Amino acid sequence: MGISIWQLLIVLLIVVMLFGSKRLRSLGSDLGGAIGGFRKSMSGKDSPEPHDRS
C-alpha cells in the first residue's frame, strides 16, 4: 500500500518538466547551504563567546 518506484519516477519527471533541471540544481544547492548554515549555528562553533556583563 506504499508508494512504488514507478510512482516516484512519474512525480520526479513532472517536477523536472515544471521547473527544469537547472533551477532544480540551484534550488538543491541553496537548500544544502541553508542546512549547513543551520547546523553550524546550532553547534555554536562559529559564534563568538558571550561576554559576561556582571
Image (cartoon, helix red, strand yellow):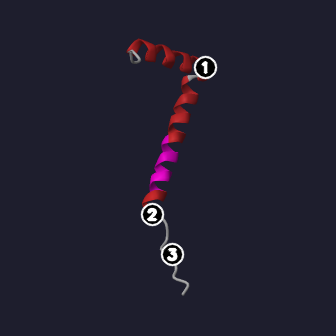
Picture coordinates of residue 18 (x, y %)?
A: 61, 19
Q: Residues within 10 Å of mark 1 (few under 14, many from 20)?
A: few
Residue type pointed to by label 3: Pro
Circle 2 sits on which residue? Answer: 44
**Mark before the other along the chain sequence, 3 or 2:** 2
- Seen at 54% across and 29% down, the residue is 24
**Mark before the other along the chain sequence, 1 or 2:** 1
Whether the residues at callouts 3 and 2 have beta carbons within 8 Å, the answer is no
Whether the residues at callouts 1 and 3 have beta carbons within 8 Å, the answer is no
Q: Look at the magenta stretch and give its main secondary structure.
A: helix
Q: CA distance from mark 3 to mark 2?
A: 11 Å
Circle 3 sits on which residue? Answer: 50
Q: Residues within 10 Å of mark 3 (few under 14, many from 20)?
A: few
Q: Which residues are magenta?
A: 32-40
Q: Secondary structure at mark 1?
A: helix
For residue 39: magenta?
A: yes
Circle 1 sits on which residue? Answer: 18
**Mark before the other along the chain sequence, 1 or 3:** 1
Q: Residues within 10 Å of mark 2 (few under 14, many from 20)?
A: few
Residue at the outermost front position: 1
Q: Secondary structure at mark 2?
A: loop
Q: CA distance from mark 1 to mark 3?
A: 47 Å
